[in-house]
Image (cartoon, grey):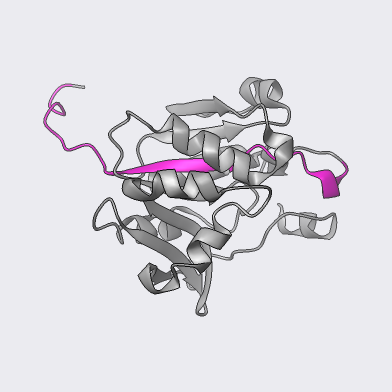
């Protein structure tokens, strides 16, 4: 676009983990659950874009081809995780690997099944970026939640530690003192869509 050649590249990439198969939801992939008439994956990717993340990488697994067919994800890079059934750790590893070479100095990680978290919370955590060593997390009444920001210098260690469904939990727990907590309870609700009962959160 004319006139934008010299704009700085945003330092924080968005990384959306959207590979889950919805085992406790009868095998309905979470990315394709409908919220306000559109798939959840669209809402989450938009929150990352509007919150200031660029590029936005979306990790797909369960029903990846159907997500590609049904979801409108303009400007997003779609990353396949063939090992998605191994748990969220495999998606985090695939997503971080996909960001190599993009120039991103941090990754902001959001989960597809948290539609109560929107662009305002994303923007707040993005603003906590200070360096490629940054660690920051949204906080809800003092409790750590998503989204979470990982400086690029930390990606290799995080990927090495990401196994099963724990993602980066163990890594973060061991580094609590380094995490900048960003209160988001006034602009977001951090519920998950994990069970049939949770579907009541969707509109």
Outermost residue toward the right in this view: 26
| Left or right of residue 164: residue 168 | left
In this rendering, the answer to whether 4 lies above or below 50 is above
The residue located at (50%, 44%) in the rendering is 159
Residue 131, position as x, y percentages in the image: 24, 54
Outermost residue toward the bottom in this view: 141
- Residues rendered magenta in the picture: 2-26
Q: Nearer the viewer, residue 178 or 19?
A: 178
Q: Where's the N terminus, which quadrant?
A: top left
In this rendering, the answer to whether 199 lies above or below 76 is below
The residue located at (68%, 20%) in the rendering is 65
Residue 16 inside the magenta-drawn segment: yes
Main SS class of the magenta portion in the image: loop
Residue 194, position as x, y percentages in the image: 76, 54
Numbered marks: total? 0
| Left or right of residue 123: residue 59 | right
Q: Nearer the viewer, residue 163 or 4?
A: 163
**Residue 167 makes an appearance in the image:** yes
| Left or right of residue 106: residue 58 | right
**Residue 74 makes an appearance in the image:** no
Residue 4, position as x, y percentages in the image: 16, 29
The residue located at (62%, 29%) in the rendering is 81
Residue 85, position as x, y percentages in the image: 74, 37
The residue located at (64%, 42%) in the rendering is 40
């Amino acid at each position: 676009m004319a006139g934008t050649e010299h704009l700085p590249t945003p330092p924080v990439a968005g990384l959306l983990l959207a590979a889950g198969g919805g085992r406790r939801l009868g095998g309905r992939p979470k990315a394709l659950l409908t919220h306000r008439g559109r798939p959840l994956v669209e809402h989450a990717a938009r929150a990352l874009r509007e919150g200031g993340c660029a590029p936005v990488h979306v990790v797909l697994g369960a029903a990846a081809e159907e997500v590609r067919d049904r979801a409108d994800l303009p400007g997003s890079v779609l990353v396949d995780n063939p090992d998605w059934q191994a748990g969220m750790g495999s998606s985090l590893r695939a997503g971080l690997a996909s960001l190599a070479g993009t120039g991103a100095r941090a990754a902001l990680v959001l989960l597809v099944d948290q539609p109560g978290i929107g662009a305002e919370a994303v923007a707040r955590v993005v603003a906590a970026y200070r360096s490629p060593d940054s660690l920051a997390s949204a906080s809800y009444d003092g409790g750590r939640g998503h989204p979470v920001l990982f400086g690029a210098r930390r990606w290799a260690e995080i990927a090495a530690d990401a196994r099963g469904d724990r993602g980066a939990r163990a890594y973060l727990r061991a580094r609590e003192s380094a995490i900048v907590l960003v209160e988001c309870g006034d602009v977001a609700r951090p519920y998950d869509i994990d069970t049939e009962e949770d579907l009541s959160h969707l509109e």
